[in-house]
Image (cartoon, grey):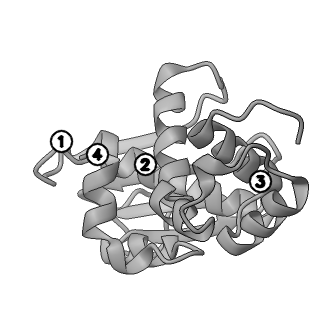
Amino acid sequence: MNIEKVKKEHIEFLTPPVDLIGIAKKHDITIFYGKYSDDFSGAIYVSDKTPQIIKEENYFKFIILNSNHAVTRQRFTLAHELGHYFLDYLDESGQYRESIYEHRDSGNRLDKDEFRINNFAAELIMPSESLFKELNNNFFKVTEIDLELVRDLAKIYQVSFDAMRNRLRWIRGFYGQF
């Protein structure tokens, strides 16, 4: 599956701030929160049977998020783990690739797979079409993005300032000072 297909199939959830929990629920993915060390952000597990570490029955698809992290970080991590679900676990027709899929990030930001998943997450949580609309379709006429604009958009999309700044740079090609 690709990001455009995912967005099309989840259009009802894409109004900012994107309803990531709604997307997860639509796919019967349970979200667990726990307190973990700072180097752990999240993980996804998909299987045809509940693992022994989960006491309740029937949790075949779940994402674990670190509740010690800021809510904005948790949201990006959730979008990231959903990226693994849609891109790595489901094939183009929406069928499961394998009976068990478990992923915990390596933490290596230079890893090509993680880069691909982070791009998916950024587009899911901060859809380019929606950002263009927020900026009244004048985005490409803007020559400079100021800090206040980045802060305002980060608040609307419930992402960190850095995530929004990076997203705007990616979309527009801005590499100026802000």
Determine the CA span between mark 2 and mark 3.
22 Å
Residue 176 is left or right of residue 25, and the answer is right
User: Upstream in the sequence, badge 1 or badge 2?
Assistant: 2
Asked if the residue at tag 4 contacts the one at tag 3, i.e. Cβ–Cβ closer than 8 Å, the answer is no
Q: Residues within 10 Å of mark 1 (few under 14, many from 20)?
A: few
**In this rendering, which labeled residue sits more in front, label 2 or label 3?**
2
Asked if the residue at tag 3 contacts the one at tag 1, i.e. Cβ–Cβ closer than 8 Å, the answer is no
Which residue is the site of mark 1? 97
Q: Residues within 10 Å of mark 3 (few under 14, many from 20)?
A: some
**Mark seen at residue 2:** 4
In the figure, 93 relative to 169: above or below?
below
In this rendered view, identify the residue nearer to me: 104 or 11: 11
- The quadrant holding residue 97 is top left
User: Upstream in the sequence, badge 2 or badge 4?
Assistant: 4
Which residue is the site of mark 3? 36
Which residue is the site of mark 2? 83
**In this rendering, which labeled residue sits more in front, label 4 or label 1?**
4
Q: Residue at (79%, 45%) from the top-left corner?
A: 144
Determine the CA span between mark 3 and mark 4.
31 Å
User: Upstream in the sequence, badge 1 or badge 3?
Assistant: 3
What secondary structure is marked by label 2?
A: helix
How far across and down, in percent of the image, does residue 13 sit?
Answer: 42, 77
Q: Can residue 42 be seen from the camera position used here? A: no
- The quadrant holding residue 14 is bottom left
What secondary structure is marked by label 3?
A: loop
Asked if the residue at tag 3 contacts the one at tag 2, i.e. Cβ–Cβ closer than 8 Å, the answer is no
In this rendered view, identify the residue nearer to me: 106 or 114: 114
Q: Amino acid under label 3?
A: Tyr
What secondary structure is marked by label 1?
A: loop
User: Upstream in the sequence, badge 4 or badge 1?
Assistant: 4
**In this rendering, which labeled residue sits more in front, label 2 or label 4?**
4
Q: Amino acid under label 2?
A: Gly
